[in-house]
Amino acid sequence: MKTLTDGEQIELELYPDEAEHSELRGGGDQLIADEDIGRSRVLIRQLAAERLPKSAGKGGVVAFDVTFHADRGNRFESARLVLSITSPKDAVFIDCQPRETVTNDVEISIDENGKMQLGVPKVFSGEAGVARKVNFALRHRVLRGSGAGTSNVIWDFAEDPERKDGILHQVNLAVTLPIGGTVDCSLSIIARLAQPGLDGRLKRFRRMIFGDHKYAFSIELPSQPPDQSKFWFGWDKLING
């Protein structure tokens, strides 16, 4: 099983879901022809896998960026990404972000227990600096995540309903884990490809899936927190209220 390293990118090529033919049963949307799909793919890069500060216990935080690439004038109208822990069997995600609809720059705070929230972190027990923040200075479209406290995190993506310009190319995601060392995971993606007609209106669609349905990989959380984080503001940068 492949172990990801910081900055490493994996490419998941998506293919038409053949089951969609039998599901339409003569009604609903017209399908994009195979020859009109091109090479639609999703690129996922591990930004960093880091231990939380010692005050936060044994856990760690992992962040990825996800880029959706449609081809031949098509666009991704929506997508669902599922990240699952396969080993250790009893391990669960502490939290995930973003986990609510976001249309602006994303600022995430992480408290001493690995819990994450959008916006300015709270002050715990009257002491500032227990929580740290991360700024993903990119605009998201519609994004909703769930799965905190379980072994499966689900993110649902959708294009801006007014602009209708597809899923924003690059999206940042983050999870926290209560354990260290090696964590085995799997990733699955289902996406809906849209093809506009000559008048600009949507004419045809196609459900796209990762060929083998799930991509298996490992995340290695270091034994110690970093002196200077690779992509956070750094654990030494405290937020006062």
Image: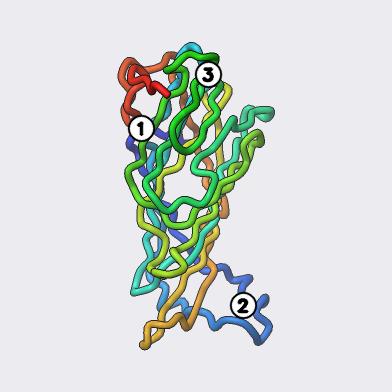
Q: Residue at x 46, y 26 (%)?
A: 220
Packing grade of label 1 (10 A; few <14, some 14-19, many >=20) is some
In 3D space, how far apart are the residues under numbered discs 2 and 1 (Cα atoms)? 40 Å
Image position of 209 with respect to 99: above or below = below
Q: Indicate the quadrant where residue 137 lies.
A: top left
Q: Earlier in the sequence, mark 2 or mark 1?
A: 1
Q: Earlier in the sequence, mark 2 or mark 3?
A: 2
Amino acid residing under circle 1: Asp
Q: Indicate the quadrant where residue 35 lies.
A: bottom left
Residue corresponding to mark 3: 124
Amino acid residing under circle 3: Phe
In 3D space, how far apart are the residues under numbered discs 3 and 1 (Cα atoms)? 31 Å
Residue 74: x percent and y percent? 39, 72
Circles 2 and 3: CB atoms closer than 8 Å: no
Circles 3 and 1: CB atoms closer than 8 Å: no
Amino acid residing under circle 2: His
Q: Any mark on residue 28, and which?
A: none
Residue 73: x percent and y percent? 34, 74
Q: Indicate the quadrant where residue 26 lies.
A: bottom right
Q: Residue at x 50, y 76 (%)?
A: 205
Packing grade of label 3 (10 A; few <14, some 14-19, many >=20) is few
Q: Is residue 40 visible?
A: yes
Which is nearer the eye, 28 or 19? 28
Residue corresponding to mark 2: 21
Tell me the SS state at disc 2. helix
Residue corresponding to mark 1: 6
Residue 215: x percent and y percent? 52, 46
